[in-house]
Image (cartoon, grey):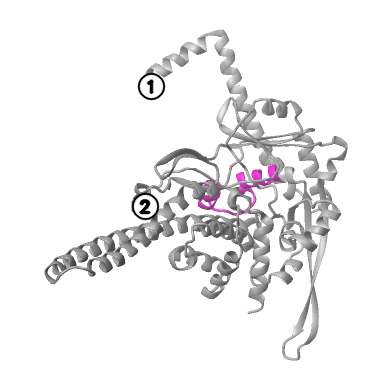
Amino acid sequence: MSSHRSKSKTITKNTKNTKITKNTKNTKKNASIHKKHNLDIISELFYQSNDSTSIINNICEFIKKNINNTKFINYTSNLTQNTNITLGRSGAGLNVLKNDMSKIAKYYYFTIDNNAIHKLCTYKTEANTHVIKDTKKDTKKDTKTDIHQCIFINNKINDILCHLIIKYINKFSNITTAETQLIHKHFLILDDYSISNSGTIIILPLVGINFIKTINKLQTPIYATNIKELITHNHNIMLSTLLHNINTNTNTNTNTNTNTNTNINTNTNTNTNTNTNTNTNTNTNTKSANQNILNLYDEFMAEHIESIYKVFRILQKHISFMHTDLKLANIFVKYDKCNNKKFNILRDYGFYIDFVLIVGDLEKSVYTLNNYKILPQRPHALKYMLLKTFTIPLHAYIQYECNTLKYDKVCSKITMHNFDLLLFIIDLFILYKHIDIDISSIFTNIKNIIKQNLTITESQFNMLLVMINKKEYINVDKISILTLSKIIAKYCKALSLE
């Protein structure tokens, strides 16, 4: 420590190095100003006025003030050419920064015309009219109209705004420190951003973990970015081995008894029976040990699922947040030491357990601020008509519709806020389906958490499993939001018929 201080004093005396010190201070000062600017501009966007025109103007002003072509070029010219990182299928470019390998840049190239910024943000109102009936006479008594005020923002701008809101969430609601810390633990937190006339870029912390994939003693180094890749290249391999060992031990018992009781005399038979009992005990103990590991994995993953559910409940309570695209490819993993000693047996067996789940890809998110519902801009008219009419109407209603009336008509038994959780869990179960595991009987902890959070019964949970298992998924890497949304739509219809 003392040598470090003396070195600092020497540097300060040097004229050239004094300039470096001043530059460093200026950089920190600029970063501080940038942070303050973010806080001020974001809080002013929606809370400075209740007038929709003012809010739209604020957002346009935010875009104009942040257009910095030089900053954008500096970032995009400082990117590595190749990367193993994948970030869903949003069409974004993704590379690690050359001068800071702990940061990753997510960028879009598209034209932002200074004279047409207002096109990136539009306002709309929609009304829901409910007929109130006299339950005794079953006649129309009165009507109630709910007015929904909505602002549609360009996806790429929404990505930046949503990241800023998550980062400064305590400025938008009476959220506790513990809740804020939990959100920041499970979301990618924005480091910096830039808007230019050529596109947008956001700087985020690097995600992903390195481990060795082992199949039949063949070892392959793997870099897993998201939970889908981690389960595919590690967890499912370990689970398959466990299930094989459990089944093999059971079969070995049967074969041993059959063979030993076949062609031997009475004396030999007595000795053989003794050996058979020993083998039976050994096999039973091995099977029990494998079953215990399987139960621990169920408990371990249930805790991770519950952590995501808890974070989403907090965000739903404070800003009515919906991700709308919560498939496994958008739930990233980052190294985080698992300190729960009871799970050490999983690590010893070969499961990679030192990670935390982190949510990213926020450009399609929907949230509410100051009674305004913020949504990503709709596709062009024809594409949107096809989307909500033939392709995935349920998903379109959540992501692009101002009011909830259309969704409620299609899916009255599953709340809109549970749509994210269903996307997550269906994608997860499709992944587990490939190792032919009986989820309902083996993953009891996971099942109970899902039932509790979705408020569904045992039979309704099994109904969901049946719908997932009906279809063969040839390539789990290409499970789209379309496939997941169609399963949810069918599930909603089945629930409404009960």
Instruction: Return the residue at label 2.
Output: 343
Q: How many numbered discs sit on the rendered protein? A: 2
Label 2 secondary element: helix
Does residue 85 sit above or below 307 in this rendering? above
Classify mark 2: residues with Cα within 10 Å, few (<14), some (14-19) or many (20+).
some
For badge 1, the amino acid type reads Met
Residue 402 visible to the viewer = no
Q: From the viewer's perspective, tell me whether residue 357 is left or right of residue 94.
A: left
Label 1 secondary element: loop
For badge 2, the amino acid type reads Phe
Residue 1: assigned label: 1
The C terminus lies in quadrant: bottom right
Residue 399 visible to the viewer = yes
Name which residue lies at 74% across and 59% down: 396
The one nearer the camera, 320 or 416, is 416
Classify mark 1: residues with Cα within 10 Å, few (<14), some (14-19) or many (20+).
few
Q: Position of residue 117 (x, y in %)?
A: 83, 40
Overall secondary structure of the magenta stretch?
A: helix
Q: Position of residue 208 (x, y in %)?
A: 52, 40
Q: CA distance from mark 2 to mark 1?
A: 39 Å
Direction right: furthest residue? 115
Residue 183 drawn in magenta? yes
The one nearer the camera, 86 or 472, is 472
Q: From the viewer's perspective, tell me whether residue 153 is left or right of residue 358.
A: right
Q: Position of residue 448 (x, y in %)?
A: 48, 67
Please give the range of residues in magenta.
Answer: 159-186
Q: Position of residue 162 (x, y in %)?
A: 67, 47
